Image: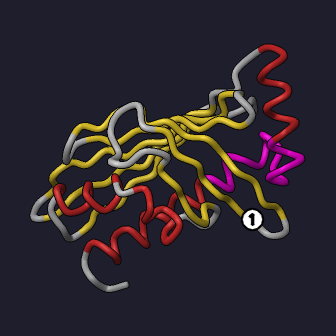
């Protein structure tokens, strides 16, 4: 089986899309939900499309910073950002929010941007060295992390944190 380049997970949250979107699009919350992200610092608030931010990440003994840029903010509908390290593109992360019954179906998605060429190989090597994760393991770690993140967002949106 070849390398998997994208992934998505979803959950239904017992809160309206506006509430869930507001929580997720406040990137300062990401450190509360993500098992890898510890905190996010937005360089020039308020957050909008094009805004840059720094993510501080940790998994086990591995600690690494990332530079992000908000790619899309569609109020109550979609929130997307790109992550890079040392000027190299790493991944696109995003969330879609769709009404479902009296709640919201939130879908978290990830796309690997380390596709081809020398820069992609360097980014793969940096991921292994700094985050302790080679590309073959990244999908399994992301799937598990996405499920945890969505569960935590759902608890926060319903006030059961």
Q: Is residue 63 above or below residue 97?
A: below
Helix, strand or loop: magenta stretch: helix
Residue at 26% in and 54% down: 21
* Relative image position of residue 128 (x, y in whole percent): 86, 45
Residue 52 image point, x, y percent: 49, 39
Count of residue discs = 1
Quarter of the picture containing the C terminus is bottom left
Q: Quadrant of the N terminus?
A: top right
- Helix, strand, or loop for circle 1? strand
State the image quarter where residue 68 is shown: top right
What colouring does the structure picture have? secondary structure
Give yes or no for residue 132 being in the magenta stretch.
yes
Which residue is at 43% across, 56% downward? 27
User: Which corner quadrant of the image does residue 35 belong to?
Assistant: bottom right
Farthest-out residue, left? 102
Is 41 in front, or is 14? 41
Residue 65: horizontal and vertical position, in percent? 70, 51
In this picture, residue 118 sits left or right of residue 154 = right
Residues packed near mark 1 inside 10 Å, few (<14), some (14 to 19) or many (20 plus): some
Q: Is residue 75 left or right of residue 52?
A: left
Extent of the magenta region: 127-142
- What residue did someone put label 1 on? 59
Residue 72 placed where, x, y %? 34, 33
Query: Which residue is at the front of the view, 108 or 100?
Result: 108
Picture residue at 52% right of the left edge, 45% below the top: 53
Farthest residue, direction bottom: 160
Vertical order, 34 against 97 (above or below): below
């Amino acid at each position: 089986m070849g390398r998997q380049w994208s992934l998505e997970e979803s959950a239904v949250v017992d809160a309206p899309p506006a509430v869930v979107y507001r929580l997720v699009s406040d990137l300062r919350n990401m450190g509360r939900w993500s098992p890898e992200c510890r905190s996010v610092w937005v360089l020039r608030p308020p957050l909008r499309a094009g805004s840059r931010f720094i993510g501080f990440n940790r998994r086990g003994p591995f600690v690494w910073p990332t530079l992000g840029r908000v790619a899309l903010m569609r109020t109550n509908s979609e929130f997307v950002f790109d992550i890079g390290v040392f000027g190299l593109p790493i991944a696109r992360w995003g969330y879609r929010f769709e009404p479902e019954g009296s709640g919201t179906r939130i879908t978290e998605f990830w796309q690997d941007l380390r596709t081809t060429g020398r820069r992609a190989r360097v980014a793969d090597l940096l991921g292994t060295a700094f985050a302790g994760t080679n590309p073959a393991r990244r999908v399994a770690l992301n799937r598990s992390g996405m499920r945890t993140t969505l569960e935590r967002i759902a608890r926060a949106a319903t006030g059961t944190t």
